[in-house]
Amino acid sequence: MRSTLLLVPLLLVVVPAAPAREQPAPSLQDLGGLAGPGGPAVVYTAREFITMNPQQPRAEAVAVRNGRFVAVGKLADVQAAAGKDAKIDRTFADKVVIAGFVEQHVHPVLAALTMNTKVISIEDWDAIDGFSPAVRDPKGYQERLAKALADHKDKAKPFVTWGYHHYMHGELTRATLNKLAPDFPVIVWHRSCHELFLNDAALKLTGIDQKLVAGFPKGVQEQINYEKGHFYEQGMLTVLDKVAPFMASPAAFKNGLEYSVKYYHSNGITVCCEPGGFVSKPVQDLINSVYSGDDVPFNHYFMVDGKTFAGRHPRDAKALVADSEQVLNWGKGRTAYLPKQVKLFTDGAIFSQLMQMKDAYTDGHKGAWIVDPPVFGYAFQAYWDAGYQVHVHNNGDAGFDVVLGELEKAMKRAPRKDHRTVLVHFGFAQAEQVKKWIELGGIVSSNPYYVTALAGPYEKIGLGPDRAKNIAPHKYVLDNKGSLSFHSDMPMAPAKPLQLVWAGVNRLTYEGNVAGPEHKVSLDQALGAITIDAAYSIQQEKEIGSVEVGKRANLTILENDPYKVGAKEIKEIGVWGTMLEGRLQPVKPAEKRPAPRTKSAPRAEEAAEPSAVSTGWNTRAKPVCAPGCSCSIGHVFGQHLVRQLQAGN
């Protein structure tokens, strides 16, 4: 076996250059020249390397050959190990360098589409048409919305906005929208992405009327308020096929994907993962056409959307798993599907306050299921028996009971070691639930931004102060020595890893309070949550997540040291750029903060050059589900985009 030298203080250790993995890393088509002895190594120096390797937390230098680290440690030792022909590169001499940031959970389809709308949201966003400052009060939102509607000149085109939140922006009804825009369609996409509001003109445009709604199953009707023009969770998913053509186009979608490349890079991300957002080969092909090139500054992984396949095969577990395997070769270049990993769903979105809670909401409303518990249980057990790592979207503690029950059942029936079942989002959980979860081998991936955005208003509406302060209760995980990673769920939070670190360390709300100080994490833990622990959550810790010999040479280069600035300044640290498998990738000045555009991003009806939207698409492919399917939001948008391409749009 070929070996290389790992340098640690006062000690030289021989380690395998390609560590054995419990599960092979997905192929990225050998981009970066990862195999073979190659040419001379390059030795990089920096103000400091933060390795995220507890055995060697700091280093003076690293050596890189063929896209991998071949030596880490003191400069003299690294130079000696790298060989006489090694080159010295001092680009990072005044920078602090950390292991490349890993974004465990983003949604390319939703990120591309939301950033293409008129963004009026509860937090700052760098959107495609320019910087959109936060607005968190009803009066401010009404003023911003009214101005945006007044500026909408082409009345033949629908106006689409994203970012509205009922608890901060006040009640919104189709009557309100009719008054503001009586003569053109308005589509308001809720901040959660799980709700829509339509005015009369939009209902007419989309063909949604009371007769149509009356024909839906009872459970769907319960998640529709036609009088208010409000459609949420299963209600939204059921009508989305009719609304989607007026919210997105292939040109706008590709524009959004290209924007996301710059966005992720400017925030130091070297690896992204989309956990089961859609099942559409043509849509994957378009994503590949943007994300797969060797010049893309990150690798992007995907995993199976189990919810979709459970809907296709509700009684045949063998067929469910077999069908799931068909997507594993859909990646290309820098995109790849993670083998034996699947995403499932339980309860509703925390941004809609539709998570399933053990105790009633203070205002009397009820939570919602995205997937009913019996269906979830069937899918969980089917994938478990097939040896999959299961990632579960869950927000409420009552929803957690359902997930926990299925894991207990699986471990009693067919116990597995190192299954790493992931509880994703981690909105609310009881201490005893988390303890049992970790004892059973489960791990947690949390969105700490929930605290920043939601703890303040939820203290007053729906939950009360005791529950609101316990959003994302990290203490329960750490007390039980569990694995904790962070994710943004972009666009549920900006895909800014340092902002996630800031949120986890400070637990500051937009209102300026500290929510649940006992759940603060240390800086070490928070940085681990966006590097090595995030890699562990997707079974890639042998390849990425820390600066160690044999791993891919992925780095994030910072302008300042997170350990030297104040805790409240962490999210302000600048990102110089990244290294991906040995390739230096400085952030261009224009990517640091996109300049406002003088013209709005393309709407659904605006066409780009045909070649710009057709690259990589198989326009003969047929949609894989019928109109009105409730597979997933991204899936329904994907099917709409496929149909547009088939129609030659």
Image: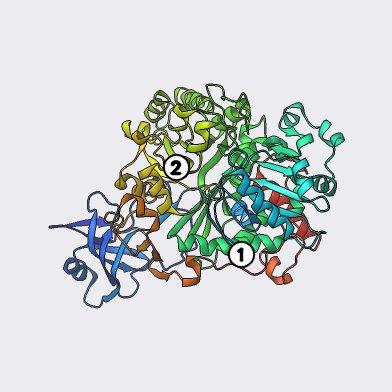
Residue type for callout 1: Ser
Residue type for callout 2: Thr
Residue identified by numbered label 2: 509
Q: Could you tell whether 15 is left or right of 226 in the image?
A: left
Label 2 sits on a secondary structure element that is loop
Task: Check the image and report above or below for 65 versus 26.
Answer: below
Of the pair 215 and 377, the residue shown nearer to us: 215
Residue identified by numbered label 1: 289
Question: From the viewer's perspective, is the residue at label 2 or at label 1 nearer?
Answer: 2
Of the pair 114 and 362, the residue shown nearer to us: 362
Q: Label 2 crowding class (10 Å Cα cut-off): few <14, some 14-19, many 20+? A: many
Residue 497 horizontal/vertical position (percent): 43, 53
Residue 121 horizontal/vertical position (percent): 59, 50
Label 1 sits on a secondary structure element that is helix
Q: Pick the quarter of the image with the N terminus.
A: bottom left
Q: In the picture, residue 227 is in which quadrant?
A: top right
Residue 301 horizontal/vertical position (percent): 51, 53
Residue 249 horizontal/vertical position (percent): 72, 59
Q: Could you tell whether 527 is left or right of 444 in the image?
A: left
Q: In the picture, residue 12 is in which quadrant?
A: bottom left
Of the pair 316 and 135, the residue shown nearer to us: 135
Farthest right residue in view: 211
